[in-house]
Structures are given as structure tokens and as C-alpha cells.
Amino acid sequence: MGPISSLIAMPEWLDLLIALLIGVGFGFALEQAGFSSSRKLAGMFYGYDTTVIKVFFTAAIVALIGSQLLSFFGLLNLNMVFVNEFYIGASIVGGVIMGAGFIMGGFCPGTGLSALSIGKIDAMVFFAGGLTGAFLFAETYPFIQNLADGGYRGPLKINDAMGISSGLFTFLLIGAAVAMFWLAEKAEKRFARPDITDEI
Amino acid sequence: MRFNNNTMTIRHKYSIVLLFLGAILAILSLSGTRSFTVKPEILLPEILDQQTIFTVDQVAKFIISEEKQVQIIDLRSPEEFMLMNIPGSVNVPYDMLIDDDPDKYIIRGSRNIIYSNGDLNANYAMVILKGLNYNDVYVMKGGMNEWFKTIMNSSFSGERISARENSLFEGRMKARKLFVEINSLPDSLKLSYMENRRAMAKKLDGGCE
Amino acid sequence: MSTIKKNIPGLIVILTLIILILIRLSGAGEFKPDLKKRAESSISLSNLITPDQAEKMAGNKLIISLDENDMILSNFKCEVCKVKPDSLVLKTNLDKIFKHKGPVMLSSSSEELSARLWMVLTQMGFKNLFILTDQNDNEVIKYKFQPDTTIGLELDE
């Protein structure tokens, strides 16, 4: 809880407790939105159910607006928020593998975990596959190291790369989100599969 | 059908609210430019704290022991920097530092020690960085002028030398030697030495692995 | 009218947010925006004045003495107020400085202290603030480096 710890000095157990509660909230939200169903998740690719993009994009822009506003009021130090490091080659290859895996398996790691917790067998198999993949990555690392570490660009933020302010980027992203929601609605009508959507 | 109409309107409302908030944020960051994010009552004790100062001897110790969690930043012009600089330091001219995003230069979790020729620019920069909530920023007291006076030009005189004085003197000699070695290199080698240091520093940057 | 009534909760939230933002923007006793513009005179060194220049300066001068640095001050015939550095952000002191019409100068025995406090006060909105110093060349390098041309090329990293 780095950024908020700068406001109040928190003992470590409290830090971890808050993290636990946030995790619980996240899992709960995923499950109640129906994300434990692999058919719902795969619907994002086939077009008959676009809930995934709506939920995740909404979450992203709410978090974006919230953190910008908190930073404006001096309650959150955006400099302390961790920004992932960007490796171009690794991101592209990893993205392709992840995308293919998502569509084939019908899960991504977070939703797979929430499905696993309600006892779904396909999630268990999916997880076995995921752990195997991680193990293979570690074992073959010396061979793929160049790809994994290549194209290093540092902790890059999109608004920095585009040369615009973060506020303007927020606004553009929200605009893009709204446009995508509208497209998603259209897609749902076009690719409707009532035989599946009625069940999930 | 009525159910559908209601949900559509709620979505429209949310979209409008979100777009509105986004517009506010865009306007906010366009109108006001950067300012300090720390409050004056909090910033003042921080900048009056003597712990924000390192002496040239302490910096000398860092560079001869190749201390990893230390980054030294030179605030002078590129020309002055190329003429001579403290070995291992990075050049970020003062006017560039206050114009640009310090995240490009400041390494969180390491001690960032800044220096200029004297006492002014380094301390201005320190206040600015602390005001922008960068915590690990320190000043080398006296700057390059003090470095020359103490490290490069000092000599020991007298009959006896205490153990502490001896280690101080030794440290200065080592730092002096390193300074002369690195700064006597032809420019091309100097540049590759600095590139190396920068690459090493980047690798040690923190985060969740 | 009825659409407004229906959406009252949302409108209240947005209105509160706008009010909070406006309050934050006006912020008294806080740091002002436009960091770089306020720091401009530190780049051009126009915020430094020597005692001689200070004597010749027009206007009602106020000197803030930050420590027991009497040497420079004894020559001055203008208002001198002694402030301990750590009480500089107290409202009474800030008001005194703010309300003063004329150049204000910071004086102390260490350039370090004056520089830091100058930056803090300038970023709080003070214009016409100077550092009183008798060294005009603090940021000028006073030594020359003689490279050793016998250094070989065996350094490897």
C-alpha cells in the first residue's frame, strides 16, 4: 500500500490485511459478474457476450479518474505507484500467447482463479496448464533470454510516449471506452447466440 | 422493451458522467502546470534536516567502494561535465531537471546525491525534488569547488596522524586517483564508461519481479 | 425539471467535486502552480544580490535574518527581522513577508540555507525575493583540472 502509506504510517499487518480485503472484494466482484463461466469469457472473442470488455474497461477508467483526482487533492502520490517495465518483443509475444490461451481455455489467470475457487474442473485443468507453462518458461529461460529481455523501454506511460498530459489522456481514453461500449452493444446484437447467453 | 430502455439510459448517464469527469481532468492538467505536491509545513522540516547533506568525504567513500544504491547527479552544463565530473555521475543540467519529469533521472530506493559547482543550484534542485515528493535526494555540500579543495588539493601535514585521520586521508587519495583516471580518459571512453554505469543502475531499479 | 430531480444524487456528487476542486485550486498558504516560472530567476542568477547592490536598490527593503549573521547586516539601514528557519511557515511570519511592499532579502551565514528557503518561499508565491550574499561566484568553478595524459586504455568495466 505504498502510495497510501505515505499519508498514514501503517504497521505491516494492516497493510497486508487491506491487501487481503481488496483481494476478497476483487474475487467477489468477478464471481458475481459471472466471470467464472468460460463461455461468458470466450464470448468476448466470438462476439455474443461483451461483458468482459465493459467490466474491465469501466474498472480501468474509474481507477484512472479516481487516482488522478486523488493525486490532484494530494491524497495519492502518483510517483509512488509502480509502473511496469516495458519490453517490446516480450510484450508482443506474451500477448499473443496469452490471447490465444484466453480464447482456447476460456480463462485468464484472475478469472481462472475465481472459477477454481468454486470448484470448476475446467479451471483446475487450466491452472495445471498455466503452472506447467510457467515451469517451462523458467527451465528454458537461458534460451529465450534474449527475447524476454529485449526491446527494453523502461517504465513507460502512454501519455508520456504520446507527449500529452495525463488529464488529456484520461479524457481520450474515456472517449475511446464509450465508443467501444457502443461497438460492443452492436456486436452483441450482430453475433447473438441466444442458446449460449440464455444459459450463462 | 421498457426494461431495455431503462438500462440504456443508465449507461448513457454513466457515460456522460465519466466523460464529464475526464473533461475536468483534461482541463485541470492543461491550465495549471506542475507545483509542489508536499505541503509547506511538511516540506520545511525536511529541507532543514541536516541528514540531507553528504560531505565530499562521504561521497568519496561511496565512489571508491562502488556503492550500488547510490546515484550521483551532476547539475552542471554538459560542457563542464565533460571537462571533469565525479566518476560515475550522471549529467542532468539544472534547468533541464526542473523542466523535465524527474522520474527519468531519479532512481527510487537509491540515494540520489546531487551536486553543482557550489552550494546554490544543488540546494535549489533538492528543494524542488523534495517538494515533488522525491524522498531519496541529498546534496553534496560545497559541490565541485569543495571536492577540489578537500579531495584533490588537501594534503596531510604534521608529525603524527590518528587512525581516523589516516582513513580519511586514504579515502581522499583513492578518490583522487579514481577522479584523475576517469577524467583523463579520452572523451569516447568516458562516454562508454558512463553508459555502462547507467545500464547497471537501471538493472537494479526496484519493482515487483 | 423532472430530469434534474431524478438525478439529484449524481448531481450533488458532481457539484461537490467541482467545489472541492475550486477550493484546491485557490489554495492559500500552499504552493502555487507553475513551478518552472517561479524558479526562473534561480537559473539566471538574478535572485542574488550583494550588500552593495542591496544598498542601491529602490524601495522599502526588508531583510530576513535566518541566523546570527551580523556581519552583513550591521551596515544596513532598513528593516531587519530575525526569523528562525523552522518558524518561517508560521502564518504570522508569512503574512509579514507577504504584506511587505518592496524587495525582501534572505540573509544567513550559509548559502545553502538561504537557497533552500528562497526556493520554498518563491514556490509559495513570493515575488521580489532575493538572497543576500557577498559571493557572486558561488556557482563558478574555482579550480582547473589537469588531465593525466599518461593514463592507459586498460580500464575495463
Image (cartoon, coloured by chain):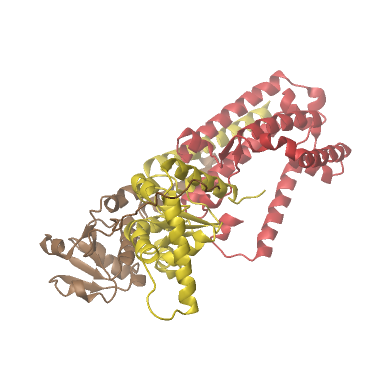
What color is chain C drawn in? brown
Q: Residue at x 72, y 35 (%)?
A: A144
Q: In this view, does C68 lie above or below B59?
A: below
Q: Where is residue B50 in the image (x, y as percent from the top left)?
A: 42, 70
Residue shown at 34%/45% (left/top)? B79
- Could you tell whether A104 is left or right of B124 in the image? right
Shade of chain A as shown in the rendered figure: red
Where is residue C41 drawn, in percent x and y? 26, 52
Foreground: B112 or B58? B58
Above/below status of B189 relative to B176: above
Q: Measured along the vertical axis of the image, is residue A49 above or below residue B164?
A: above
Q: In this view, does A50 lie to the left or right of C145?
A: right
Residue A170 placement (x, y as % from top left):
51, 37
Q: In which quarter of the image is residue A59?
A: top right
State whether residue C28 appears in this view: no
As drawn, the residue found furthest toward the top would be A190
Between A124 and B197, the one lying in front of the other is: B197
Give the quadrant of residue B31. top left
* Left or right: C93 in relation to B169: left
Figure quadrant of the N terminus of chain A: bottom right
- List x then y, in percent, for residue B155: 38, 70
Q: Chain B is drawn in which colour?
A: yellow
Q: Residue furthest front?
A: C150
Q: Nearer the viewer, residue B9 or C21?
A: C21
- In the image, what residue occupies the spot 57% across and 27% down? A179
